[in-house]
Image (cartoon, coloured by chain):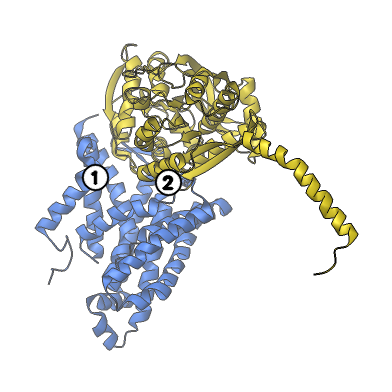
Chain colours: A yellow, B blue
Amino acid sequence: MTQMSRRTFLASASLATAGVAAGPWIGRAGAQAAPIKIGLVLPYTGVYAVLGESITQAMELVFARENWTVAGRKIEMIKEDDEMKPPVGVRKTEKLIDSDKVDILTGPVHSGILMGMRDKVHSSKTILIVSNAGADAISRERCSRWIFRTSFSNWQPCQPMGGWVAKNISKEVFLTAPNYQAGKDMMNAFKETFTPAGGKVVDEDYPKLGETDYAPYLTKIRQSKAKAVFAFFSGTDAVNFVKQYDQFGLKQQVKLTGAGFLTEPDVLPAQGPSALGIVTGHFYTPLLDNPTNQKFVKDFREKFGGKMPDGFACQGYDTAEVIVRALKAVGGNTQDKDKLVDAIAKVEFDSPRGRFRFDPNTHNVIQPFIYIREVKETPLGINNVPIDKVADVKDPGTGCTLPA
Amino acid sequence: MTLPVDLFAQALNGLSYGILLFLLSVGLTLIFGMLDVVNLAHGSLYMLGAYAGLTVIAITGDFWLALLLAPIAVGLVGLVIERICLRPLYRRGALDQVLLTFGLVYLFEDLVKWIWGGRIRSIAPPAMFSGSVTIWGATVPSYRLFVIAFGIAVAALLWLLIERTRLGAIIRAGVFDAEMASGMGIDTERVFSAVFGFGAALAGLSGVIAGPIQSAQPPMGATILIPALIVVVVGGLGSLKGSFVGSLVIGQAETFGKAWLPGVSMLMIYVVMVAILLLRPQGLFGRPLR
């Protein structure tokens, strides 16, 4: 062993002293600042990864604004890829609840995953803030005190469109949507206001989910002599339907309207000019001129390389905003879950989509507006330009008995 | 609109869809007929064709150039697959080949995601075919009329190539009895490679042709495989005439199913397949089963 020099000895001694002095302080801070864990169950691979990405990016934008610290506690995001498969989503949910012991859960995109994770979330009293999946049931007979939704119920973007289309476009409309539950739910929501406004459903068709050739349906639309079409398609279905609708020369003759997903930014680039003129109802478009949205669009584009935020990003932004505000209201205390749930239910703020608040009876967002948007050429590319709006769209919540 | 016009319009829809199915499946049927290989990666080659076409159009803005270059690129990929992956497996059972080509489906899907990303993409129709035309009261996109004409031309050229040329005679000899053909001094290995590459190029060609009608995204290779396999089975394994007629039959059945029986249209294609196989187990133009 070499002899320790005086200088080395002094240096180590002073370090040790400093350590002893700092020790208790570090320990205390550590106990106070156990991070708040937020679990995300979203698609991060596959075709729907772009949706999961938008939601996550907007959440990161909000948390970064707060320096990833709320009420003295660090925010930690744990991301799990649900691959858009219900069994995977449910397994990841169990992992986040049972082994990661997350304080708050968010996601999923897929309604099937939402329905699959619902009972686990409810029975474990885990707070879930749904940031996309639109299954109406979660605001109705399957609602839960522990589940909130910042995105939408499938009913919400469609119900106001019925009356609007009857009044402003035509009373003779052809309905079409994919042949599954959400498709039929949306068409029924449309009829709720369309028929009382004097509208007549000329005919309706439900092509299979994932259809690639809509020609037979488009020929039927033409021969039905309908003056307008109300359609709900998303993903590749939306691209194929809109392109083929244009190629069949229908666009000039039969006005195409629909639920917002028909022309969201995940499909608009592939639709291209075929989408021009389509009128849809949705709770958001990046072209809203309120100050919160203008700041959101500017910050989002700066942080993510010029990418335009979409409805999914707005959902992520509002989810994170709800979390931040509720945590501040309870002083960062995540142990008293009842208090935290009450705080979340009371959160109210200016969101990019308008004044955000939950419906106390369903824990679903009350859409401040459903914006009627028309696809137009803008300086920032083809996008949804707001042309009208319907205020305070609240899911009927049939069968939900909150507050339980 | 009157019933005859309606019938004519839907028949035209069915024809354009059927021709698209033919372009999709003809490469599969050729490869099966010649090499006795069920190439499950055929859909992936179709997908590669669509994406290669997208890239050529992004660079040059020319659809026709894409229609020329993408099949060549995919054909070369086919040659590599045949040489490296399939050749060692010819003497092994069909199961090994199926497993291998099924593995390629996943490989190509990830490859496409890696190079082009998972976003939905699409090809715009060439400017001269971007509108629609009305024939006898039926309105059809002019691009679909082009697809019909193009598909019939491809079918005619393939028929001439296989039935009327020396190369075709060699291929037919190989299909009939590869061992005997090889005994007659035909280099069957080279013919196998050429046929596989050619079949792959046809898949790539159909990817570009389908681009303006359908969108492109990574799982497309797997979704298109089922209808292509059904066409091959209905038409008769390995028969060019069979894949042409089979495509047209399936195209009409599915179109009229969607138009008239929308509730069960999903089943239509399977109902037709089962019915034909019950009546003719070897398919419409297949060689009788021994």
Amino acid type at mark 2: Glu
Label 1 residue SS: helix
Label ID, residue A63: none
Q: Estimate the x, y position of residue A386 in percent, counting from the top left.
A: 53, 22
Q: CA distance from mark 2 to mark 1?
A: 31 Å
Q: Is residue B36 above or below residue A124?
A: below
Q: Which of the 4 image quarters holds residue A252?
A: top left
- Judging depth in this view, the residue of A286 and A34 nearest the camera is A34
Label 2 residue SS: loop
- Judging depth in this view, the residue of B230 and A311 nearest the camera is A311
The residue furthest left is B279
Q: Estimate the x, y position of residue A152 in percent, counting from the top left.
A: 44, 26
- Residue at which label 2 appears: A83
Q: Is residue A331 above or below residue A84?
A: above
Total label count? Answer: 2
- Quadrant where the N terminus of chain B sits is top left
What residue is shown at x 19% (from left), y 33% (from top)? B3
Q: Is residue A153 above or below residue B84?
A: above
Q: Estimate the x, y position of residue A377 in percent, counting from the top left.
A: 56, 31
Q: Is residue B260 above or below residue A163?
A: below
- Residue at which label 1 appears: B254
